[in-house]
Every structure is written in structure tokens, then in C-alpha cells.
Image (cartoon, rainbow, N blue to C red):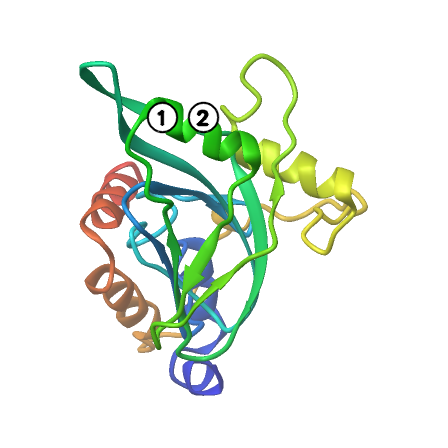
Amino acid sequence: MLLWKKLLGPVALMSLSMLGFSVQSYAATISSQSDVEILALDGVEVNDENFANPEMLEVPAGHHQVVFRYYGDVRKGQRDVIYSTAPDVFAIDLKQDDSIKILAPHLNSYTQAESYFRRGAEWQIQDQHGDVKSVRYEALTGHGIMPFNNIEGAVARHNAEQGNEFAPQVQQSVATPNIAAQKITPPKGDDTLIQTIQLLYNNASPAQKQKIKAWVAGQ
């Protein structure tokens, strides 16, 4: 991080933050088998917009919260159907270079799946060494007719009700300046800002590049 500060300076780091890029190095990964869907990580919905690779989530070493569910094909009579469960949640400590995969139970029929989850699933993870262990989890609490339609809202409410370390922090209302509306004028001859923008664009995903182009066109 110190190297980034020296090379880019405060104006460049502000640009990194504004465009949604992180200069933090990633050290661990979280993934799942095909019949397990990871819905949220640390309160953020897992999708193409929020994560560069939703199939292999890169995270810094530390404590993380994973929200997931079973979502797989099973046989019901003479046809294949999707069997899905309400979300479960667990927390885990990851060290540098750790890699975990959430394993799916082996289920073939709809009735087998109903029976298995009625008894209570045993969720397991496999690490980078091939070792398998069970994880302690809890059901994600929800409210209303479609309690998990807004997964980020459901996770935030759940954490607040549980009063756990992932609960959203209540902050005092403070007037903040509109950084996006402010003009930053670097010294003459200083092309740091241009270099930073080029760096951001070159390292962006195709979707992010389209957003940057659209934003520039609208200025």
C-alpha cells in the first residue's frame, strides 16, 4: 500500500476509490460446487457487477461471512426440477493463500432432498489441501413474502438482529462533500492523474470499461 501511495499520490488514490478499484492485495479464495449458490459475501451480493469472478471469490486474509444455499437439479417423478433451499450463513477465518470450496450434498430425488434438509444439512468445506471439515452455520432470518429477494437487505437485518460483528455500524449523520462534483486541478506538467486513469482503464473488466466510457461521454 505504501508503494501505491508513493507512485500514485493522494489524487490517484482518490481516483481509484471513486471508480471502484481496490489497491488491496487479495490472498484467499472462496468457491462452491455447482449445486451450491453463494449469494452474498461480507454483506455484498455476489454477482458480476460486484465481483470480478463470482465463481471464484478473491478475498483478503481475515474473517468473512458467507451466505449460500443449495440450488440443484433433482428428479421429481419423470422430470428434472430445481430444488432450492432458504439461505444459510457461516463465518470463517482465512489466512493468506487459503482456498475453500463449499461442498454440495449428493441428492438425486426431490423427496430425498426434502428429507435431507428437513433433518438439517451438514455443510462441509474442502480446503486447498483436500481436507474436508464441517462448518457451523445458521439459517438466514428473513421477513415478508419474499424475504430474500433483496439479499443485501436480508443479510444486514439478520446481522443487526444477531448483534454480531458483521452488523452494520450506526454512524452519526455527517454532511459529506460531493467528491464527484469537485474539480481536481493537478500542477502543470504533472501527468499523474492521466497515468492513473490509464492504469484504471487498462486493468478494468469489459463491463467496467463500458461504464467508464459511458461516464466520460456524459461529461
The location of residue 131, given as percent across then percent down, is 40, 72
Tell me whether the residue at label 2 lies in contact with that at label 1, contact meaning CB atoms closer than 8 angstroms: yes
The location of residue 186, given as percent across then percent down, is 41, 69
Q: Name the residue under label 2.
A: 114
- Label 2 sits on a secondary structure element that is helix
Q: Is residue 183 left or right of residue 73?
A: right
Which residue is found at the position 81% from the left and 46% from the top? Answer: 172
The location of residue 12, given as percent across then percent down, is 41, 69
Q: Is residue 118 above or below residue 210?
A: above
Q: Residues within 10 Å of mark 1 (few under 14, many from 20)?
A: some
Which residue is found at the position 56% from the left and 34% from the top? Answer: 119
Which residue is found at the position 70% from the left and 46% from the top? Answer: 168
Q: In this view, does 91 lie above or below 139?
A: below
Q: How crowded is mark 2: few (under 14 residues within 10 Å), some or many (20 or more)?
A: some
Q: Mark 1 points at which residue?
A: 83
The location of residue 113, given as percent across then percent down, is 40, 30
- Label 1 sits on a secondary structure element that is strand
Q: Give the alpha-carbon distance from disc 2 to disc 1, as whole Å.
A: 9 Å
* Closer-to-camera residue (65/153): 65
Q: Would you say residue 164 is visible in this rendering? A: yes
